[in-house]
Image (tube, coloured by chain):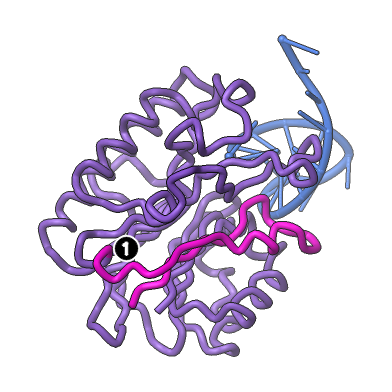
Amino acid sequence: MRIASFNINGTKARLPRLIEWLEERRPAVACLQEIKCSDDSFPAAEFEKIGYRAIWHGQKGFNGVAILADGTEPVEAGRGLPGDPEDVQSRYIEADVATSFGAVRVVNLYLPNGNPQPGPKFDYKIAWMQRLRTRLAELLESEQPTVVVGDFNVIPEDKDTFSVRAMANDALMQPASRDAYARILADGWTDAIDTLNPQGGVWTFWDFQAGAWQRDQGFRIDHLLLSPQAADRLVAAGVDKEYRGREKPSDHAPVWVELA
DNA sequence: ATGCCTAAGCCCCTTAGA
């Protein structure tokens, strides 16, 4: 079964591209980030028409995440990242999804970008990552097969960007961002795309500006992390790169992992 | 040193993105 993640950069603007991708690739689970719409305006009926049930955590104008499942209702297991009652941004949702090998816990996140750095936005990012690590450690203890996907807004290593120099001062690549990501992995999570592509050079994002797509100047910031119980089932992972080249695309391409 | 594009709301400019 395939679990995919796609930062769509606006549900309303991207709906035709999104429906097209779901019908062509038919992932069992599709996690969306930056739905950029209120709870009221999420087009759940459009997804039901093509066989997907959804849960979502919206926010007017910005952020927002959703989990879609093919032919089954995702069972919500939490919305909002625990650990800060002051945090009102919609960036995190969890669900159990029924599969042939039992319920898989799916975590879908849109990690704060953190630019400009240094500054309060970067501080929020790093604090958010510390809270995330705490929550994910709890999930590891459950020993349920768990998949954590989304736009992490972290370039894990130098091999994950077209240019270290161009990104050197960006929040996505600061040592504090990388350390926080590495600590999460060290707790026991497997980065699926990195594990299958250790040489690097795999991109999931290409900027709209300066011809980045045409020049293949991208980086890898959308990740799929597997708990040990899910990693045992890993057979493939990849990027649906061609969708970045279609009409009115998101600046991200979908990423996916195949579990046996 | 900056803008390069794009989406959405505050709607013809501003904010935010990465």
Residue A251 image offset from top left, x and y in percent: 67, 50
Measured along the vertical axis of the image, is residue A114 above or below residue A106?
A: above
Residue denoted by label 1:
A147
Q: Tell me, yes or no, whether the highlighted magenta stretch contains residue A236.
A: yes
Check the residue under mark 1 and report the chain it is in.
A
Chain drawn in blue: B
- Which chain comes out purple in the rendered image? A
Vertical placement of residue A9 versus A178, above or below: below
Q: Residues within 10 Å of mark 1 (few under 14, many from 20)?
A: many
Q: Amino acid at mark 1?
A: Val
Q: Secondary structure at mark 1?
A: strand
Residue that appears at 65% across and 77% down: A19
In this orientation, which residue lies closer to the viewer: A88 or A186? A186
A176 part of magenta stretch: no
Percent x, y for residue A7? 56, 56
Determine whether, in the image, residue A233 is placed left or right of residue A19. Answer: left
